Amino acid sequence: DMHDLRHVGQIDIKVNDIRCSGDSLYVGTASGLYVIDKDNHHISWLSPFGTDGGRPVGVDVIMPDKAGHLWMSSFSKGVMCVDSRTWECIDHIEMPSDMAGVDNEVRALAYDESSDIILGTNVGLMRYDREERLLSSFGQRYSNCSVESLYMDMAGSLWIGTYSDGAGYTHPYMNRFSHHDFPSDNPSIGISGPMVMNHGNLYMGTEGGGLISWNPKTDTYTSYPCVPSSRNTFRENNVKSVMSDGHLVYVGLYSGWVYVFDVRKGRYVEKYH
């Protein structure tokens, strides 16, 4: 309602991610983490990664787990796990300093079948063994790719979206990755937003190409630009967030617009600003 909107409006900085867990709404921003109590609408601000150059380090991706922990990634200080009740730091993952090309920016997070943490980085996929506290790279196919999005479906398959090398997936019972290049005539091959599954198809947000749907059964892609693509519509087709709800997929754009895609009709049915 409008009372909620006025309170949430106090967050006036770039929002990177929003997650709901229990009675709290977690908002990752360019200046740290905001926690909104859904009952009394109280907003708290934290800087879990401290500062860098005198400024709070931003929170990029948020991933609550079933144990009441909150996993967060940053642009410059790796990944942190905190107890969401006490805010005690449970774990902190930093990228290996001896790995060529790697930095401390983690762009995507997911669990695998053993509850290890999968990290999407600028040099591919990494797996963090929570018991041994060991970090290792895996998925040679993506070792030179910037992994922008990860999605674990209900069957346990891990879907991977990259910025410049298409998408793929792997299953815990498979010892290989299945890779899929986008069609050459697609306006953009860069995955820029989260991936969601809806009615058996995978929907991916691209940077400049709008929404892409992939049908795993037929191995076919369909592109759904929010506005007809041309040189001047990059901003209007730059997808930053994707959310599935029933037969609808909500597409958040860099321009500030939200488009609503109906998977049954195969087209956008509404838009908001």
Image (tube, rainbow, N blue to C red):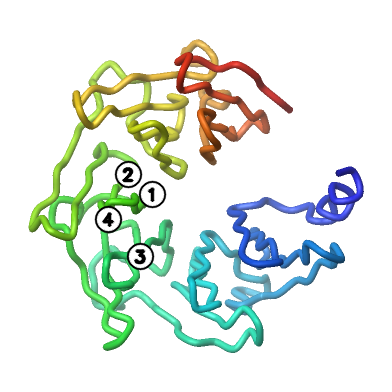
Q: Position of residue 262 (x, y in %)?
A: 52, 21
Question: Residue 148, labelled with which disc?
Answer: 1
Mark 1 closeness class: few <14, some 14–19, many ≥20 residues within 10 Å: many
Q: Nearer the viewer, residue 168 or 234?
A: 168
95 relative to 200, above or below: below
Q: What amino acid is found at the position of numbered circle 3 in the picture? A: Tyr
Q: Position of residue 243 (x, y in %)?
A: 53, 40
Q: Position of residue 121 (x, y in %)?
A: 34, 60
Displayed quadrant of residue 27: bottom right
Q: Closer to the observer: label 3 or label 4?
A: 4
Mark 3–mark 4 Cα distance, whole angstroms, equals 9 Å
Residue drawn at x 27%, y 72% is: 114
Q: Quadrant of the N terminus?
A: top right
Q: Locate residue 1 relative to residue 24 in the image: left or right.
A: right
Residue drawn at x 29%, y 39% is: 164
Mark 4 closeness class: few <14, some 14–19, many ≥20 residues within 10 Å: some
Question: Residue 272, labelled with which disc?
Answer: none
Residue drawn at x 27%, y 27% is: 215
Q: Which residue is mark 4?
A: 156
Element at label 4: loop
Element at label 1: strand
Q: Which residue is mark 3?
A: 111
Mark 3 closeness class: few <14, some 14–19, many ≥20 residues within 10 Å: some
Asked if the residue under mark 1 is in contact with the one under mark 2, i.e. CB atoms within 8 Å, the reply is yes
Q: Closer to the observer: label 3 or label 1?
A: 3
